Image (spheres, rainbow, N blue to C red):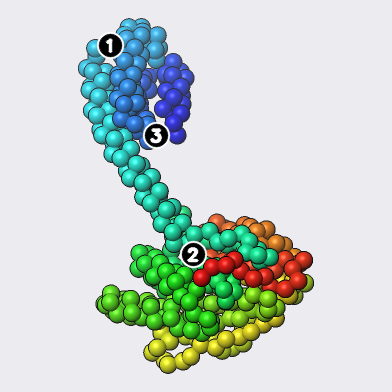
């Protein structure tokens, strides 16, 4: 785009001597300031305006242009062209100044969004003891940085505690809810010894916040989530599912969902139905890998409307380490959707190193 004005002038100069008409194509130079305004600032547009007027005069005063025998430097049609070019130049300069301000504002907003994302969805540690962790976040909106999908991994004295969640709705309300949920989880994960108590405390915090905010939308603001815990020195993983897609266990070519059929309601709805949280326990072996994800993955459609076949794809990738697994998943989702994601996507991959004798103790925290 920055070279477009130069290309515009070159094409015009090539056409000018080959145009056998009384009005040469040099009149097209009137548009040069607007062409320059697409990619340059007001100073460059003003300079392009002056250059266009001078070049129009040179072409008009040169007898050989367009097969003329005399020049028309001060012909009324050319004078009108000079005036029109000057007016368009003024408008182009104003447009370039406005565009430059908007670009600066957009750059500032993107910078703030990047900072907000690092606070809201901070990178998970790549390794905790002999656990390896990787995360993935994809926004359905090209310019978005954060949304309602969330994840977290916290090392505590009770074990490594994991969270994956999906807030109902979009926009700022979803981001605000995700921030409140993550804040409650990061605080409670160090204090609550039992996983159901952790989920209950997070839901209590969400309900309290919804009551303080009030309004009809606050009552509908619920979150599907999975809480998982890998205790120290125990070959198992505990899972509390709150209406969320179940985690997937990848083990030596085997891929299966960790779903016992006892999922609790989503957070912020549990108190309405009065159900308690159920803990499901599964064995965890050295070399096993766990994938927690949001439903944006399985609801991704291709051009024919077919959903993304996550489990079938994972059977081909179950031997990949977490980083390579999520990279492959990332590219395959974009290929499946034709680079048009319909929903935000979050995923968290955790693996126990093959040489680990048992589930590792977490870093001393909490």
How far is disc 1 from disc 3 in space, using C-alphas? 31 Å
What residue is shown with label 3? Answer: 39
* Residue 147 in picture, x, y percent from top left: 43, 63
Considering only order in the chain, which callout, 3 or 2, is on the residue closer to the N terminus?
3
Q: Who is closer to the viewer here, 300 or 351? A: 351
How far is disc 2 from disc 1 in space, using C-alphas? 61 Å
Residue sitting at x 67%, y 82%? 282
Report whether 347 appears left or right of 37: right
Q: Who is closer to the viewer here, 189 or 88? A: 189
* Residue 325 in picture, x, y percent from top left: 67, 62
Label 1 SS: loop
- Label 3 crowding class (10 Å Cα cut-off): few <14, some 14-19, many 20+? some
Label 2 SS: loop
Quadrant in which residue 251 is drawn: bottom right
Q: Which quarter of the figure is the N terminus placed in? A: top left
What residue is shown with label 1? Answer: 73
């Amino acid at each position: 785009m920055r070279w477009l004005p130069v290309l515009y002038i070159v094409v015009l100069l090539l056409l000018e001597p080959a145009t056998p008409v009384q009005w040469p194509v040099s009149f097209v130079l009137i548009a040069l300031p607007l062409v320059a305004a697409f990619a340059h600032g007001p100073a460059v547009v003003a300079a392009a305006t002056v250059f266009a007027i001078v070049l129009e005069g040179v072409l008009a005063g040169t007898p050989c242009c367009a097969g003329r025998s005399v020049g028309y430097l001060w012909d009324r049609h050319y004078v009108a062209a000079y005036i029109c070019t000057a007016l368009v130049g003024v408008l182009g300069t104003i447009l370039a100044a406005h565009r430059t301000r908007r670009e600066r504002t957009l750059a500032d907003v993107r910078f703030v969004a990047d900072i907000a994302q690092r606070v809201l969805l901070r990178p998970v540690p790549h390794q905790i003891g002999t656990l390896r962790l990787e995360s993935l976040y994809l926004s359905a909106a090209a310019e978005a940085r954060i949304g309602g999908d969330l994840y977290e991994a916290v090392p505590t004295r009770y074990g490594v505690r994991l969270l994956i969640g999906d807030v109902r709705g979009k926009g700022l309300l979803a981001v605000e809810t995700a921030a409140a949920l993550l804040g409650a989880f990061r605080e409670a994960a160090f204090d609550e010894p039992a996983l159901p108590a952790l989920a209950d405390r997070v839901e209590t915090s969400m309900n309290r916040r919804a009551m303080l905010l009030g309004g009809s939308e606050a009552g509908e603001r619920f979150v599907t989530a999975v809480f998982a815990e890998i205790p120290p020195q125990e070959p198992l993983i505990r899972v509390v599912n709150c209406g969320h897609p179940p985690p997937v266990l990848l083990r030596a070519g085997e891929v299966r969902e960790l779903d016992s059929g006892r999922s609790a309601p989503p957070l912020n709805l549990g108190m309405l139905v009065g159900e308690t949280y159920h803990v499901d326990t599964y064995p965890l072996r050295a070399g096993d890998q766990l994938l927690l994800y949001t439903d944006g993955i399985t609801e991704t459609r291709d051009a024919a409307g077919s959903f993304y076949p996550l489990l079938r794809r994972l059977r081909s990738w179950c031997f990949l380490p977490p980083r390579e697994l999520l990279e492959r998943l990332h590219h395959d989702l974009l290929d499946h959707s034709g680079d048009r994601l319909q929903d935000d996507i979050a995923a968290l991959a955790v693996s126990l190193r093959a040489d680990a004798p048992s589930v590792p103790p977490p870093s001393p925290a909490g």
